[in-house]
Image: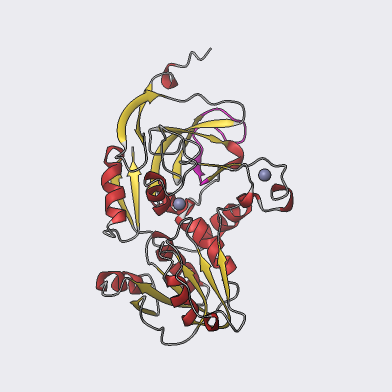
Amino acid sequence: MDSDPDFSGSMLAMRLHAPREALRAERVPVPQPGSGQVLIEVAACGVCRTDLHVVDGDLREGRYPLVPGHEIVGRVARGGTRFAAGARVGVPWLGWTCGKCEYCASGRENLCARARFTGYTLDGGYAEYALADERFCFALPERYSDAEAAPLLCAGLIGYRSYAFAGDARTLGLYGFGAAAHLLAQLAKAQGKRVFAFVRPGDESGMKFAHACGADWAGGSDQAPPEPLDAAIIFAPVGALVPQALAAVKKGGRVVCGGIHMSDIPSFPYALLWGERRVQSVANLTRADGEAFMRIAGDTPIRIETKSYPLAQANEALADLREGRLEGAAVLLP
Ligand SMILES: [Zn+2]
Ligand SMILES: [Zn+2]
């Protein structure tokens, strides 16, 4: 039925055909929006550590071929009723929820048993166009360019949800200083926190980057912070950091695990948990998180470090993230 010549053609998409394979650059038909969906012309798509877990098959619900990418910034090309054509929108990891289960009914749609995820169980933004359910799209703060806004959609948003679980911590530790921590450190400083950054032991440039983002102290993850922490957030996918972070937080402190996948946590003495210390994971996001975070990001000037790659170089961007060669966030530009 579609007679619009602009959107009936083909597009470049970077697709995963099987776990642990390189993405393939392919021409595929531009998808057509169904009811309640918008077709988005992708302007930028962030590269997130979760994309590595999808590509590596650590997350097992993907179906192939799959277009990764869940930090999508683009403009509405057609479809839907919520946004005007041409409106800039962002698409996050949470792409659809059932709206009916006990979690959806209690404001915890992040835990919906039937949730669908952008760039994992739904095709994502490593492409020239992407489809999204318009109810799960966000308007984006105008102060950020397309490339800068992309990492807000996961690194920023999941970082913010993790930060919320850290409560009213005055001293905050951040383990793993990548895309999420570099945004969150600036937000925490703007809110008067003391920020302690933990990087791979010996990673001098990582420590320098953390200082440049406002951290009060930066050191190796094997070091003790100069003062005990009220809370720690772990962004690195390394389970061995859990007991290390527990040792760094004071009584009543929290250790928040911000990643979707982590290596096994080694056994540790109960004394590390004693004193009402808590370990907490963070799963996905709710739309309410997104609205709240985009408001804060609009009000707080954050310097967002990005490294841009052409869309066709998605494999290079993933490799740079895997090897720890990035400061800030990788972003693909179609
Ligand atoms: Zn649900
Ligand atoms: Zn992500």
| Front in this rendered view, residue 208 or 283 | 283
Q: Is residue 18 left or right of residue 325?
A: right
The residue segment tinted magenta is 78-93
Q: Is residue 91 magenta?
A: yes
Q: Residue at x 56, y 33 (%)?
A: 84
Quick check: 24 left or right of 7? left
Q: How many marks?
A: 0
- 173 vs 9: above or below: below
Considering the whole magenta stretch, tell me its main secondary structure.
Answer: loop
Q: Position of residue 278 (x, y in %)?
A: 59, 74
Q: Place residue 74 in its image quadrant.
A: top left
x 31%, y 38%: residue: 23
Relative to residue 292, is residue 97 depicted above or below? above
Which quadrant: the C terminus?
top left
Vertical placement of residue 299 versus 278, above or below: above
In the foreground, 239 or 245:
239
Q: Position of residue 76 (x, y in %)?
A: 50, 33
Q: Position of residue 188 (x, y in %)?
A: 49, 71
Percent of width and height locating residue 192: 51, 77
Q: Residue furthest bottom?
A: 227
Asked if residue 72 is positioned above or below residue 34 in the image, the reply reads: below
Tell me the quarter of the picture where residue 271 sits.
bottom right
Q: Residue at x 29, y 58 (%)?
A: 326
Scheme by which the image is coloured: secondary structure
Confirm whether the magenta stretch covers residue 210: no
